[in-house]
Image (cartoon, grey):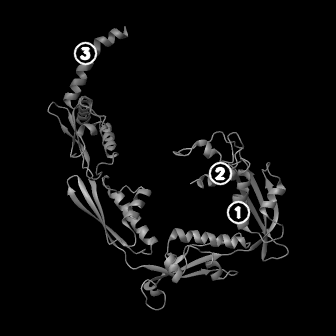
Amino acid sequence: MEKAYMRFFRPFLFVLILFAIISGALPPSLVRVNAQQAQQQQRLVEDVRIVGNRRLRQDDLLYYVQTRAGDPFNEAQVQRDFQALLALTFFDKTASRVYTEDGPRGGVVVIFEVKELPIIRDIQFEGLKAVTESDVLKAFREQRVGISKESVFDPVKLRNAVRVIKELLAARGYPNATVEPRQEEVSQTSTAITFVINQGDRVRVVEIDFEGNENFSDGELRAQMKLVREAGLITRFKGQDILDREKLDYDLRNVRQYMASKGYLNARIGEPRIEGLGERRTGLFIPLPLLSSTDEALRITVPVTQGRVYRVGEVKIEGNSIFSEQVIRGVLGLTAGEIANGQRISKALYEDLKKAYGSQGFIQYSAEVEPAYGDNAQNPKEGVADFTITIDEGKQFTLRRLEFLGNTFTRDNVLRREVLINEGDVYNQLRFEQSVLFLNQLG
């Protein structure tokens, strides 16, 4: 009965809705939006075009575009296609765009307008004297800068290239060098790059001072620095009077290890301060070519926090099964009450014991040392350090297979005679290293 009732009034309901639309009972904006959405959903893609490409073929680029002629237009998919093209690193992202036009049949024409990045045809260096061009190009390859002949030009990669050149010059004593890249258009699809370099004055380290070292003299700590030293006749020819931050950090680690070897286990090295001192004559006091020059001078000031000196307290060893505790203690060489030698502890754990375990096939050996610091009741100026050493021996390995590659003239059986371990034997790191030495001596 209800179904028959609804069938009877359905035509009248349609007439009422149509009358409401005509009379303005429904909002016109809602009507337009619904009409536009319906029209947009019905519009099809008539064509997909790529414009602005000169070097790259359109068919090759359309391979990365999923929008096809005849598909319903989808704005989100078009934007994804545009990002896929930019991800190819062939185009200038700031000068490329995507837009649509009305098609002749009422559909949509999608147009990807791209601007190709040029190909680098030539690279030149002007004013480069302290570093060879081959060294610069080698640094570009090792650090994967991406600037080379026949590669795609990218402004971001060009900035990285400038940074690498400055780092190379700073390592040679020219930290104030300026590098200006200059781009010259060779054709519409290629370019040439020239790096204009002003090296500036050479800078040398003339003073290295330490602050806070109460029990160590400056000369004692400076003696531990091998790569960065004060300017002198010998350091001049060895290039050791040049400020290189990586070398300086390495030297300061050696200084800290030296202090730890004297029992100052909590010694700390602060951030060094670098000051310019103006021009000074370095080398000999008399002006002689190559032996002296007037250079910009630097002073390096290193803050030091010594802390207390510590003596050896209790030593606990955990996790060992291959070597007894007595053997490990003998390798460590720690005696209760003596000055704790942090450098010797590190060498014993990470070099001597590693070799010992490697000789038994335990090549995954690792160790951790956890110190616990306390007061020394006998001397309030000193401390006591208890050490807990945890050893992870890992698995024992055997030599399963031995192969030789690149032996064009020498037979395998001749090479095997020089190897001190055989297939199936427990792997021995010491014998393997000795075998490599014997193989190299064959000539």
Tell me the distance, in whole angstroms, between the alpha carbons under discs 1 and 3. 97 Å
Task: Assign a secondary structure to mark 2.
Answer: helix
Tell me the distance, in whole angstroms, between the alpha carbons under discs 3 and 2. 99 Å
**Pointer 3 local density, CA inside 10 Å: few below 14, some 14–19, many at least 20:** few
Tell me the distance, in whole angstroms, between the alpha carbons under discs 1 and 2. 24 Å
**Nearer-N-terminus badge (1/2):** 1
237 on left or right of 380 = left
Which of labels 3 and 2 is toward the front?
Answer: 2
Which image quadrant is residue 187 in?
bottom left
Which image quadrant is residue 159 in?
bottom left
**The furthest residue to the left:** 104
184 on left or right of 280 = left
Q: Amino acid at mark 1?
A: Lys
Query: Residue 278: percent from the left, percent from the top?
Result: 44, 85
User: Which disc is residue 11 wearing?
Assistant: 3
Query: Residue 416: percent from the left, percent from the top?
Result: 63, 44
Q: Amino acid at mark 2?
A: Ser
User: Which disc is residue 347 wearing?
Assistant: 1
**Pointer 2 local density, CA inside 10 Å: few below 14, some 14–19, many at least 20:** some
Report the residue marked by disc 2: 435
In this rendered view, identify the residue nearer to me: 249 or 46: 249
Whether residue 2 is visible, yes or no, is yes
In this rendered view, identify the residue nearer to me: 424 or 312: 424
Residue sitting at x 66%, y 39%: 400
